[in-house]
Image (cartoon, rainbow, N blue to C red):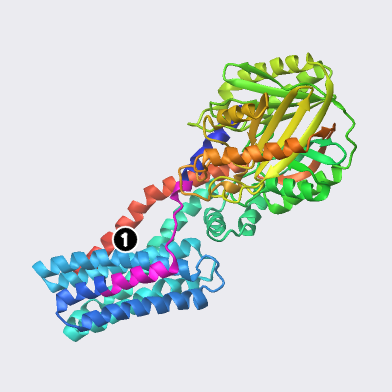
Amino acid sequence: METDRSLNHSMANAKKHYSSLFSLPSYKQSLIYSAAICVAGAGLTTYVMSNSIISLVLGVFFFAVTVFADLFISLMVLKDDPIFILRRTSAVSLVGWLIWLVFMTLGTVMGAFFDMVLWVKFVLFGFAAILTLRALVIMATSESAVWRQVLAVLLQPILCIVALLVFWASISIVLSLRFLPFIILAPIISFIAVYLFLRSIDRLGKTYGLLSMPLFKAFLLNWATDLNVPLEKHLEAMGENADIDVSLLKFDSSKPQAAIIVPQVHPGPFKNIGSSLLPSMLKSRFEKEFGGAACTPLGILGHELDLVSQAQNQRIVNQVLASAKFPALHATASPFVRATDGFATASGQIFGDIVFLSFTLAPKTTEDMPQELGRLVNEEAKKYGLEHAVVVNAHNCLDVVVDTEKYVEELKRAAIKCLQQATQQPIKPFKVGAATVVPKEFTLKQGMGTGGITAITIEVEKQKTAYIIIDGNNMVPHLREKILAALATWGFANSEVFTTDSHAVSALSTGSRGYHPIGEVINHDALIKHIKKAAEKAVANLEDAKAGYTQFVVPQVRVIGEERLDAVSTLVDKAIEQAKKTAPLIFGIESLLFVLLVLLF
């Protein structure tokens, strides 16, 4: 329990840095902004100090050199580095010019009041600053050879400073030669400062038994280009083997109607890494193989069972497909029942000797739950003569972060009450219908996974129940209740809403969480309209049905593991804290050296 809380805390600290992600301007925008800065900004500040039309020509030259250097770096120097496509290379140059313009403007003001030499000194400070910026960005992110990194750092700034040297020489050859040593020494100092800074981060990783910079580069590669293999290679190496339990509850009529697949795998950690895509993969492959509508609600577990790669996903999928060819034999079901205890709600329904039971804390935050809950339900179910229990986390409310652990006892009591009620209900023949709707207007960035919305409807005598499974990572508060109220008006007396907890939607947005839960940016009325469509299609498919169940183990699957995931999550947070402490010291000393050099020369 304490370990679970520690892991959740470290994961939360890592996730908060998703807000550091940012969007870059398009290449066209970078060109426009760079042209404005070079010609109107750098050119005019140079003109103010020289009163020469050549300064405006110099501004045009700056822009032309920047465009040429960016093209050459992207297409030749870093051509095999997927990070540095032309758009990103030009964005680095644009940011550099913004910084340089600030120094040029300050120099112009100071030079106009005091001495032109001050303008030159500020221009040199700007030159040193963009060298450091480019070195930090390229050395921290590029996997290219060192000489290629060095050339990519130096090319654009050196071409521009050489042009300025020539310009200064046209005014005074002494002025130009005076600061030549600074121009030679500045790159050396910048590279040393950046090297020391990155080494300090890398040394921190070694205390956790991890390689900080290779992990960072692999993460950045995934964020920027969607490449999953580099990061998954690291996760494979760090991971551990685990036996994965899978529960499969299916409903067949004259044809396959529906399947509820619950692997004891957490669909994370984010984006297309590890098992993030597993819910939609399982759904798609199962439906293609058997027909009907499949869904994958979240089991009772947490991030300690994230898979490390797509290859491990495929092992789960293959085993599910191979194990699903069994007959559905149970022709009776109980009505849907619901029990509460404090904030905890447990909902259940029996099919033959199988109970399907779900937990929620809505309208309180309903996040990952400890595995002991699943074990408790299985043990209690057997006391009531039931052979199997499929236990899921509805994962359907996300408000301010709440420690789910504090409600474990309430959840346990609610589960026992639910089992008591369910086993006291009459057992009758039942009908099942299912359908899936994939709203085209909802995207991953908005929080909707590619699995869309699945509705499974169960009719026992006069009671009609809808299970609504949405492929997403949790929901905003009170949306569940709004959906349940709408379902009630459509004739569904008792229902429940689930999300798959798919992390395919994570690390795609710039919010504090790095993802949007269902309903945060998706219009509620539009969502409910699609849910109604899915439910109506499911009702139209209602047929007398039978239920079947199987449980199996996929052996020795590679998972990230609680200990390593905790280390990675902690490292993310600690590395950023370390950077905040180290950067002022290292780059402060670097800046002081530049000041002393300028004063010396």
Q: Which residues are magenta?
A: 18-39
Give the percent coordinates (x, y) of residue 277: 66, 48
Q: Nearer the viewer, residue 46 or 285?
A: 285
Find out whether residue 600 is within the magenta segment.
Answer: no
Quadrant of residue 538 within the rendered picture: top right
- Estimate how packed mark 1 is, as few (under 14), some (14 to 19) or many (20 or more) residues with alpha carbons within 10 Å: many
Disc 1 residue type? Glu
Q: Main secondary structure of the magenta part?
A: helix
Side of 291 where 130 appears, left or right: left
Q: Nearer the viewer, residue 264 or 175?
A: 264
Q: Quadrant of the N terminus?
A: top right
Give the percent coordinates (x, y) of residue 240: 70, 44
Q: Residue at x 63, y 21 (%)?
A: 345
Residue picked out by circle 1: 590
Residue 387 visible in the picture: no
Q: Nearer the viewer, residue 375 or 332?
A: 332
Q: Nearer the viewer, residue 169 or 184?
A: 169
Give the percent coordinates (x, y) of residue 460: 78, 24
